[in-house]
Image (tube, helix red, strand yellow):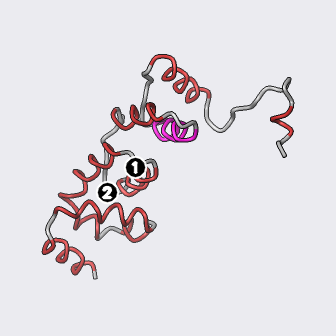
Protein backbone atom coordinates (compact mmCIF):
# COMPACT_ATOMS: atom_id res chain seq x y z
CA UNK A 1 0.00 0.00 0.00
CA UNK A 2 2.77 2.50 0.90
CA UNK A 3 5.91 2.89 -1.11
CA UNK A 4 9.18 1.58 0.26
CA UNK A 5 10.62 5.05 0.82
CA UNK A 6 7.84 5.87 3.29
CA UNK A 7 8.21 2.68 5.31
CA UNK A 8 11.97 2.81 5.88
CA UNK A 9 12.25 4.92 9.01
CA UNK A 10 16.06 5.03 8.96
CA UNK A 11 16.30 6.31 5.39
CA UNK A 12 16.46 10.05 4.72
CA UNK A 13 13.68 11.54 2.62
CA UNK A 14 15.13 13.18 -0.46
CA UNK A 15 13.79 16.58 -1.39
CA UNK A 16 15.20 17.12 -4.85
CA UNK A 17 12.31 18.69 -6.72
CA UNK A 18 13.53 22.21 -5.87
CA UNK A 19 16.92 23.76 -5.25
CA UNK A 20 18.54 24.11 -1.85
CA UNK A 21 18.11 27.89 -2.07
CA UNK A 22 14.37 27.54 -2.64
CA UNK A 23 13.96 25.20 0.32
CA UNK A 24 16.01 27.61 2.41
CA UNK A 25 13.63 30.45 1.52
CA UNK A 26 10.63 28.23 2.31
CA UNK A 27 12.01 27.43 5.77
CA UNK A 28 13.02 31.05 6.31
CA UNK A 29 9.42 32.04 5.66
CA UNK A 30 8.04 29.36 7.98
CA UNK A 31 10.24 30.55 10.84
CA UNK A 32 10.30 34.30 10.24
CA UNK A 33 7.27 35.17 8.12
CA UNK A 34 9.43 36.67 5.41
CA UNK A 35 11.75 35.47 2.66
CA UNK A 36 13.73 36.81 -0.26
CA UNK A 37 11.84 36.72 -3.54
CA UNK A 38 13.36 37.46 -6.91
CA UNK A 39 12.75 36.81 -10.59
CA UNK A 40 14.70 33.55 -10.36
CA UNK A 41 12.82 31.93 -7.49
CA UNK A 42 9.27 33.32 -7.49
CA UNK A 43 7.78 30.54 -9.64
CA UNK A 44 9.34 27.78 -7.54
CA UNK A 45 8.43 29.43 -4.22
CA UNK A 46 4.79 29.84 -5.25
CA UNK A 47 4.72 26.25 -6.48
CA UNK A 48 6.16 25.06 -3.16
CA UNK A 49 3.62 27.13 -1.24
CA UNK A 50 0.86 25.48 -3.25
CA UNK A 51 2.30 21.97 -2.91
CA UNK A 52 2.83 22.23 0.85
CA UNK A 53 -0.40 24.24 1.30
CA UNK A 54 1.30 27.22 2.94
CA UNK A 55 -1.36 29.81 2.17
CA UNK A 56 0.45 32.63 3.98
CA UNK A 57 3.53 32.10 1.80
CA UNK A 58 1.47 32.14 -1.37
CA UNK A 59 -0.19 35.39 -0.27
CA UNK A 60 3.23 36.82 0.68
CA UNK A 61 4.50 36.00 -2.81
CA UNK A 62 1.45 37.61 -4.40
CA UNK A 63 1.83 40.76 -2.29
CA UNK A 64 5.60 40.99 -2.82
CA UNK A 65 5.90 39.92 -6.42
CA UNK A 66 9.48 40.92 -7.32
CA UNK A 67 9.14 41.96 -10.94
CA UNK A 68 6.61 44.05 -12.71
CA UNK A 69 8.54 43.77 -15.97
CA UNK A 70 5.68 42.57 -18.11
CA UNK A 71 6.10 42.87 -21.85
CA UNK A 72 4.36 41.64 -24.96
CA UNK A 73 6.45 38.47 -25.05
CA UNK A 74 6.02 37.31 -21.46
CA UNK A 75 2.59 38.60 -20.44
CA UNK A 76 0.79 35.43 -21.54
CA UNK A 77 3.14 33.28 -19.44
CA UNK A 78 2.43 35.48 -16.40
CA UNK A 79 -1.32 35.29 -17.05
CA UNK A 80 -1.08 31.50 -17.04
CA UNK A 81 0.99 31.58 -13.84
CA UNK A 82 -1.33 34.02 -12.04
CA UNK A 83 -4.44 32.05 -12.94
CA UNK A 84 -2.93 28.64 -12.19
CA UNK A 85 -2.09 29.72 -8.64
CA UNK A 86 -5.01 32.16 -8.13
CA UNK A 87 -2.73 35.13 -7.45
CA UNK A 88 -5.16 38.02 -7.04
CA UNK A 89 -2.75 40.95 -6.88
CA UNK A 90 -0.66 39.67 -9.77
CA UNK A 91 -3.86 39.32 -11.81
CA UNK A 92 -4.73 42.94 -10.97
CA UNK A 93 -1.26 44.10 -12.05
CA UNK A 94 -1.54 42.11 -15.27
CA UNK A 95 -4.94 43.60 -15.98
CA UNK A 96 -3.46 47.10 -15.64
CA UNK A 97 -0.73 46.12 -18.11
CA UNK A 98 -3.08 44.46 -20.61
CA UNK A 99 -5.90 47.02 -20.82
CA UNK A 100 -4.01 49.87 -22.53
CA UNK A 101 -2.58 47.54 -25.18
CA UNK A 102 -5.35 44.98 -25.47
CA UNK A 103 -5.67 45.29 -29.26
CA UNK A 104 -1.92 45.07 -29.80
CA UNK A 105 -1.65 41.97 -27.62
CA UNK A 106 -4.68 40.43 -29.29
CA UNK A 107 -2.87 40.71 -32.62
CA UNK A 108 0.27 38.98 -31.34
CA UNK A 109 1.20 35.45 -32.29
CA UNK A 110 1.57 34.58 -28.60
CA UNK A 111 -2.16 35.14 -28.15
CA UNK A 112 -2.99 32.45 -30.70
CA UNK A 113 -0.33 30.11 -29.38
CA UNK A 114 -1.73 30.32 -25.85
CA UNK A 115 -3.93 27.66 -24.30
CA UNK A 116 -7.63 28.06 -23.60
CA UNK A 117 -7.15 29.11 -19.97
CA UNK A 118 -4.66 31.84 -20.83
CA UNK A 119 -6.96 33.22 -23.52
CA UNK A 120 -9.90 33.19 -21.10
CA UNK A 121 -7.82 35.06 -18.52
CA UNK A 122 -6.64 37.56 -21.11
CA UNK A 123 -10.13 38.25 -22.46
CA UNK A 124 -11.45 38.63 -18.90
CA UNK A 125 -9.17 41.65 -18.49
CA UNK A 126 -10.95 43.37 -21.37
CA UNK A 127 -14.29 43.37 -19.56
CA UNK A 128 -14.10 47.06 -18.64
CA UNK A 129 -12.91 48.30 -22.02
CA UNK A 130 -16.37 48.59 -23.50
CA UNK A 131 -18.11 46.40 -26.02
CA UNK A 132 -17.45 48.65 -29.03
CA UNK A 133 -13.71 48.75 -28.42
CA UNK A 134 -13.57 44.99 -27.83
CA UNK A 135 -15.48 44.27 -31.04
CA UNK A 136 -13.21 46.61 -32.98
CA UNK A 137 -10.12 44.76 -31.71
CA UNK A 138 -11.57 41.34 -32.49
CA UNK A 139 -12.81 42.38 -35.94
CA UNK A 140 -9.40 43.81 -36.79
CA UNK A 141 -7.76 40.44 -36.05
CA UNK A 142 -10.32 38.40 -37.97
Label 2, secondary structure: give it. Answer: loop
**How many discs appear?**
2
Left or right of residue 16: residue 94: left
Which label belongs to residue 41?
none
What is the x, y in percent for residue 98? 25, 56
Decide if residue 21 is on the left or right side of residue 134.
Answer: right
Classify mark 1: helix, strand or loop.
Answer: helix
Q: Residue furthest top?
A: 32
Horizontal and vertical percent position of residue 49: 51, 36
- Is 113 inside the magenta-drawn segment? no
On the image, the x and y values in percent for residue 139 come to: 22, 81
Secondary structure mostly seen in the magenta stretch: helix
- In the figure, 51 relative to 8: above or below? below
| Residue on which disc 2 sits | 72
Mark 2 or 1, nearer chain start: 2
Residue 41 colored in magenta in the image: yes
Image height of 122 relative to 2, above or below = below
Residue at 24% across, 65% down: 104
Which-is-in-front pick, marks 2 and 1?
A: 1
Q: How many residues crowd around disc 1 within 10 Å: few (fewer than 14), some, or many (20 or more)?
A: many
| Residue drawn at 36 percent across, 66 percent down | 120
The quarter of the picture where the C terminus appears is: bottom left
- Residue located at (86% from left, 30% from top): 8
* Residue under the point 31% across and 42% down: 89
Q: Which residue is mark 1?
A: 82
Q: Are marks 2 and 1 in contact (CB under 8 Å)?
A: no
Q: Which is more toward the observer, 124 or 42? A: 124
- The magenta span reads 40-51
Alpha carbons under labels 2 and 1: distance apart: 16 Å
Nearest to the observer: residue 76 or residue 9? 9
Seen from the viewer's position, the closer of residues 71 and 10 is: 10
Vertical comparison of 116 with 77: above or below: below
Amino acid sequence: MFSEKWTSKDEPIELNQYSYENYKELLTFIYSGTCELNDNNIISIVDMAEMYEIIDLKEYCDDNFPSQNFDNTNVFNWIEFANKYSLTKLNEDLEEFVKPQFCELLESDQFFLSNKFVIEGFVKYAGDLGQAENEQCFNKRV
